[in-house]
């Protein structure tokens, strides 16, 4: 299936979240259809768990409800740091997009590609209050030392943390650690 997730993950939460958010905003299905540009028929199907939807349509529904995409697709029991929602699966078996985690943003986001040699360390200065970082490790093992304790992340793993604190990236392993870093201001 293309541009949508399998029934067992995101779509299992979309119907329940859509109904809850729509009712909380006091909108009828018809009023939501008009506000979002999504047909009432599709909204009925989504709330009933019978319809698949594109990611862009979920964005439009969320905007019309004054909600975030994350609120639309997440298991209500999940934390922002560990969402783990498969949101898209492509035609190939290896093609998929998983919403791993989310942090609030004020004005800016930066994407960085990092590599850290064995034994290497990078000590960072605290960012302004409200800033966050998201890292995803593709190779090796990275330790992020924060004031609240170390976060050790291996290949395929991630960490989310507020960066308005002293922190450091440390490679204690014997292979290069490669990771993606997203800074959100």
Image (cartoon, rainbow, N blue to C red):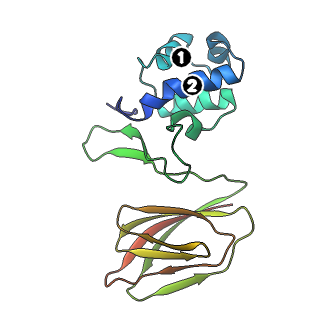
Quadrant (top left/top right/bottom left/bottom right) for the N terminus? top left
Quadrant (top left/top right/bottom left/bottom right) for the C terminus? bottom right
Rendered location of residue 19, percent (x, y): 58, 21
Crowding at dot 2, Cα within 10 Å, few <14 / some 14-19 / many 20+, comes out as many
Q: Please identify the quarter of the rendering in which residue 59 is found.
A: top right
| Marker disc for residue 89 | none
Rendered location of residue 27, percent (x, y): 69, 16
* Residue at the (65%, 34%) spot, across then down: 67
Rendered location of residue 42, percent (x, y): 50, 15
Frontmost residue, 47 versus 69: 47
The answer to whether residue 145 is left or right of residue 49 is right
Taking the view exactly as shown, the residue that stands out farthest to the right is 129
Frontmost residue, 10 versus 30: 10
Badge 2 marks a residue whose secondary structure is helix
Read off the residue under disc 2: 18
Taking the view exactly as shown, the residue that stands out farthest to the left is 93
Against 71, is 27 above or below? above
Read off the residue under disc 1: 43
State which tag comes first along the sequence, 1 or 2.
Answer: 2
Query: Is the C-beta separation of discs 1 and 2 under 8 Å?
Result: yes
The answer to whether residue 76 is left or right of residue 97 is right
Against 35, is 54 above or below? below
Frontmost residue, 10 versus 58: 10
Q: CA distance from mark 1 to mark 2?
A: 8 Å
Against 110, is 25 above or below? above
């Amino acid at each position: 299936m293309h541009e949508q997730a399998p029934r067992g993950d995101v779509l299992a939460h979309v119907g329940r979240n859509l109904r809850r958010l729509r009712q909380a905003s006091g909108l009828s299905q018809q009023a939501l259809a008009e506000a979002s540009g999504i047909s009432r028929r599709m909204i009925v199907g989504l709330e009933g768990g019978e319809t698949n939807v594109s990611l862009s349509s979920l964005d439009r529904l969320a905007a019309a409800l004054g909600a975030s995409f994350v609120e639309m697709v997440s298991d209500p029991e999940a934390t922002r740091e560990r969402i783990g929602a498969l949101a898209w699966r492509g035609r190939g078996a290896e093609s998929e997009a998983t919403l791993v985690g989310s942090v609030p943003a004020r004005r800016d986001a930066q994407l960085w590609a990092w590599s850290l040699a064995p034994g290497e360390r990078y000590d960072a200065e605290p960012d302004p209050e409200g800033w966050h970082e998201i890292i995803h490790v593709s190779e090796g093992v990275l330790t992020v030392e924060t004031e609240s304790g170390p976060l050790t992340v291996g290949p395929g793993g991630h960490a989310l943390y507020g960066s308005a604190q002293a922190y450091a990236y440390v490679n204690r392993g014997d292979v290069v650690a490669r990771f993606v870093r997203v800074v959100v201001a």
